[in-house]
Amino acid sequence: MALSTRSRELAFLLPGAVVGIVGAASVASAGADELRAGPVPVVAIVAGLFLLMHIALRMRAPEADPYLLPLVGTITALGLVTLYRINPDLARDQVLWLAVATAVFVGVLVVLPDHHLLERYRYILGVTAVVLLLVTMVFGTEINGARLWIQLPGGQTVQLGEIVKVLLVLFLAGYLRDKRELLAVPTRAIGGVPMPPIAVLGPMLLLVGLALALVVVLNDFGTALLFFGVFLAMLYVAAGRGAYVGVGLGIFMAGSLAVWLAVPRIQDRVDTWLHPFDDPQGRGYQLVQSLYAFADGGLLGPGWGEGFLIRADGSSVIPVLDTDFIYTAVAAELGFIGALALLCLFVLLIARGFTIAAAAPDGFSKLLAVGLTAVVGLQAFIIIGGVVRLIPLTGVTLPFMSYGGSSVVTNFAIVALLAVVSHRTRRPYRPRARRSGEAWKRAAVPAGYPGEEDEDE
């Protein structure tokens, strides 16, 4: 007898639970030189939170993709075990943020009956994104050279840029869906490249360009790279023209060169990336130690709790090991196989996101799923590529793993939105009409809803 969609999800949640239980027990046993169960209450709380998310999906989105939550659960379990290895206090704090993320996840499913409702507010969402960046620029606290955090009473900080990522994707999905015919059929050529009218690109380029400029002012070039990559991905899906991507990459290369020439901090990062061993105890220390940790991990790794990550005084060998270099910590203890397995989990998660986008029956749903998936995928690529010296380090967080409340909450909101898209693809939303008449039905259902006329169907 075939399992239902939600029963399959529940079954696939078990591997993540096993990873969390075995991992926590391994770290606790390694530190005590004897077999210990580890923080059983904390593991039970985490399992309960994912069970609550599963129940919410069963009640509010029963047709949602059954593999999203298990993949995220396994990645989260790996992240929590790694944080517990680095600093148990950080792991406990992360569980508290996971509880907040669970509330947001459930809230999205309860409050948002259908994602198409967000299309009506695309301009408001885009302007809100820029306003949040302006608030960060004015009231933000500078840490490690970047002004990204808003200080809250009690010492906690929030990173509004995490919310901005989702808001910009929502704006771009709505705008590009509305203008995709004009984007797909250019009316004039600029420099030999067919381009649409400036009136079509104007509002989009204004908001995205302003957001990018503010991020650059905030000295967060990793987020700027993420924004631009997501923008190009969504533009390509909307228009289907590789020329736009080519022009965008050209602009990106020119902008990167200008930033490299103008900003000494970026010059230092590029020089460190190219020549980390020229100053292994100074500018290149983090990257050199990361490479050494990968080498020490070998093929299979020494096991959780056995790698050389923490000194006797409790400090980490690699600075910011709990955020920027958490992938390095996994490789140091689980080896190449463990790091590759984690990378495969991210690839599978991205594949599920794009599968949801491919199955969506309308343009807004496709663009929204592509944009949200690109946010997670590009962020993972940027941080993993940085710690293995594929690209310069940028300082973004690894989704679902790095320590940080804003990142965890935002990423679980992204998963909830993807779940809503996949559910509504299989079960179209039909708002109840409170008045009779065909005109009211059209007013109640925005353009692009499954079941309405849409050339994407």
Image: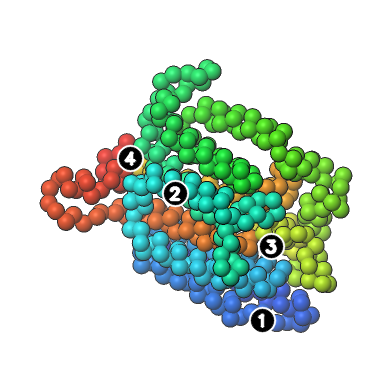
- Which comes before the other along the chain, label 3 or label 4? 3
Q: How crowded is mark 1: few (under 14 residues within 10 Å), some or many (20 or more)?
A: some
The CA span between labels 3 and 4 is 45 Å
The residue under label 1 is which amino acid type? Ala
The residue under label 3 is which amino acid type? Asp
Q: Which of marks 3 and 1 is in front?
A: 3
| 352 sits to left or right of 394 | left
Q: Which residue is pictured at 72% across the width and 51% down the height? A: 387
Q: Which residue is pictured at 33% across the width and 46% down the height? A: 120
From this viewpoint, which residue is outermost toward the front?
138
Examine the image and state in which quarter residue 143 appears: bottom right
Q: Residues within 10 Å of mark 4 (few under 14, many from 20)?
A: few
| 327 sits to left or right of 356 | right
Q: Which residue is pictured at 79% across the width and 58% down the height? A: 293
The residue closer to the viewer here, 309 or 160, is 160
Q: How crowded is mark 3: few (under 14 residues within 10 Å), some or many (20 or more)?
A: many
Q: Which residue position is annotated with label 3?
A: 322
Q: Is mark 1 on a helix, strand or loop?
A: loop
The CA span between labels 3 and 1 is 23 Å
- Which comes before the other along the chain, label 4 or label 1? 1
Q: Which residue position is annotated with label 4?
A: 457
Examine the image and state in which quarter residue 299 appears: bottom right
The CA span between labels 1 and 2 is 47 Å
The image's colouring method is: rainbow
Q: Is 408 situated above or below 443?
A: below
Would you say the residues marked 3 and 4 are in contact, meaning their CB atoms lie under 8 Å apart? no
Q: Is mark 4 on a helix, strand or loop?
A: loop
Q: Which residue position is annotated with label 2?
A: 128
- Figure label count: 4
